[in-house]
């Protein structure tokens, strides 16, 4: 989770533990009541406040991704109730009792990272972590966090609650993984028997299930959406690499139009794009750099010698004369993705040439071993 964490204490013992915890969480910010001033607050950048902690909580909710409170659980629940908005945006909230015996995950356990933060706090203080999220307790798939550590994005979140219920209630669930990292099962026990893993929508089509988890870089057909997403969640793994070649001075808008149009034509999801790749001659190309910045994509660059190590079905002498490489977009995409065959060999449109490669991961069975 993000390191923007506030540690807040209102009692003598809480301040002692808060000071200790803040040293073990270097990026955290410590707040406590000014009556417990010890003289080194300015040096340690500790913030003091007077009056009720209730007054500063709304600002802390806006400023931090996680808040650790050395305050009683009941008091915290009453204070934060009026300022809660949405589990997708509310910060993680962790409560520690005044003896430091328990660290309790209170709010945004999954999406906000409170469960992870609770474990870190408990480890730092020698406390017992208290986590009540069903998927954590049962050691099963956390639907709203599935693949998050790999950078997967959830594209359809509206059915997350009923799908989560199906998972924890041990109803039949189909997990379709067509691409993406396979090491997502973290426990030292087999995947629960009510969860069936399939490699494609075709393999899963005739199965009986109550909910579906779909991991794919493809745009689903309307029939697939109706079959699997009526009570399903769709995840986008970062597995698409776009190899780009372009004439000097090509605008970001032109490159973007080619990218978006090509992805649509190839039935590929924009959210599954991992990065761009090109020749080192284009490392400072403004249009490419602007596109990468707009979408948060890395731009990987290769020398002509590196690109020429990739066997091409259609090497270009013309490209070689200008760049020293027999191809740009295709070998760049393949090298970056670590693939042998492209999804799209090469497409030229105006000033832009684009190729697409897929990052391939191990056999899906490895995920549940």
Image (cartoon, rainbow, N blue to C red):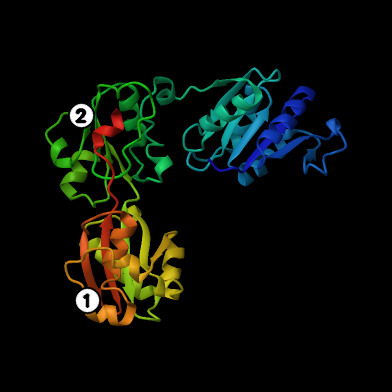
Q: Which residue is mark 1?
A: 316
Residue 80: quarter of image: top right
Q: Which residue shows up at 36% across the image and 42% down it?
A: 157
Q: Quadrant of the C terminus?
A: top left
350 relative to 185, above or below: below
Number of residues whose C-alpha sits closer than 10 Å to that of mark 2, classed few (under 14), some (14–19) or many (20 or more): some
- Where residue 218 appears, as percent x and y from the top left, is 24, 51
In the rendered structure, which disc, 2 or 1, sits on the residue that comes first in sequence? Answer: 2
Left or right: residue 32 compared with residue 294: right
Residue 209: assigned label: 2
Foreground of the two, 295 or 276: 276
Foreground of the two, 23 or 281: 281
Q: Which residue shows up at 44% across the image and 71% down it?
A: 283
Most extreme residue toward the right is: 39
- Where residue 284 appears, as percent x and y from the top left, is 46, 73
- Where residue 338 appears, as percent x and y from the top left, is 30, 54
Left or right: residue 45 compared with residue 61: right
Most extreme residue toward the left is: 206
- Where residue 131 appears, as percent x and y from the top left, is 51, 23
Residue 350 can be seen in this image: no
Determine the secondary structure under disc 2.
Answer: loop
């Amino acid at each position: 989770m993000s390191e923007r964490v506030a540690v807040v204490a209102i009692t003598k013992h809480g301040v002692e533990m808060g000071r200790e915890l803040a040293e073990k969480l270097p990026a955290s910010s410590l707040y406590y009541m000014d009556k417990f001033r010890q003289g080194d607050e300015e040096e340690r950048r500790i913030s003091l406040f007077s009056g009720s902690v209730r007054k500063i909580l709304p600002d802390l909710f806006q400023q931090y991704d996680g808040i650790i409170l050395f305050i009683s659980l009941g008091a915290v629940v009453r204070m934060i109730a009026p300022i809660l908005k949405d589990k997708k945006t509310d910060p993680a909230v962790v409560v520690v009792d005044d003896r430091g015996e328990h660290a309790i995950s209170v709010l945004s356990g999954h999406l906000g990272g409170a469960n992870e933060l609770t474990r870190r706090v408990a480890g730092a203080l020698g406390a017992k972590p208290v986590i009540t999220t069903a998927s954590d307790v049962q050691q099963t798939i956390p639907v709203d966090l599935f693949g998050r550590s790999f950078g997967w994005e959830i594209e359809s979140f509206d059915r997350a609650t009923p799908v989560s219920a199906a998972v924890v209630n041990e109803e039949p669930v189909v997990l379709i993984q067509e691409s993406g990292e396979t090491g997502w099962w973290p426990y030292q026990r087999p995947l629960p028997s009510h969860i069936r893993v399939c490699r494609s929508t075709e393999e899963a089509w005739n199965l009986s299930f109550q909910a579906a988890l779909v991991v794919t870089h493809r745009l689903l057909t309307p029939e697939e959406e109706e079959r699997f997403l009526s009570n399903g969640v769709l995840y986008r793994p970062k597995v698409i690499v776009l190899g780009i070649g372009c004439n000097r001075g090509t605008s970001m808008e032109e490159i973007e139009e080619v990218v978006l149009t090509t992805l649509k034509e190839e039935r590929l999801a924009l959210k599954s794009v991992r990065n761009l790749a090109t020749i080192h001659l284009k490392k400072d190309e403004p249009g490419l750099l602007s596109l990468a910045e707009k979408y948060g994509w890395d731009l990987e660059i290769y020398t002509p010698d590196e690109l020429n190590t990739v066997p091409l079905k259609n090497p270009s002498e013309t490209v070689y004369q200008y760049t020293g490489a027999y191809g740009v977009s295709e070998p760049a995409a393949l090298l970056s993705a670590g693939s042998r065959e492209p999804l799209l060999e090469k497409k030229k449109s105006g000033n832009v040439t684009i190729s697409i490669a897929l990052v391939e991961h191990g056999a899906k069975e490895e995920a549940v071993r």
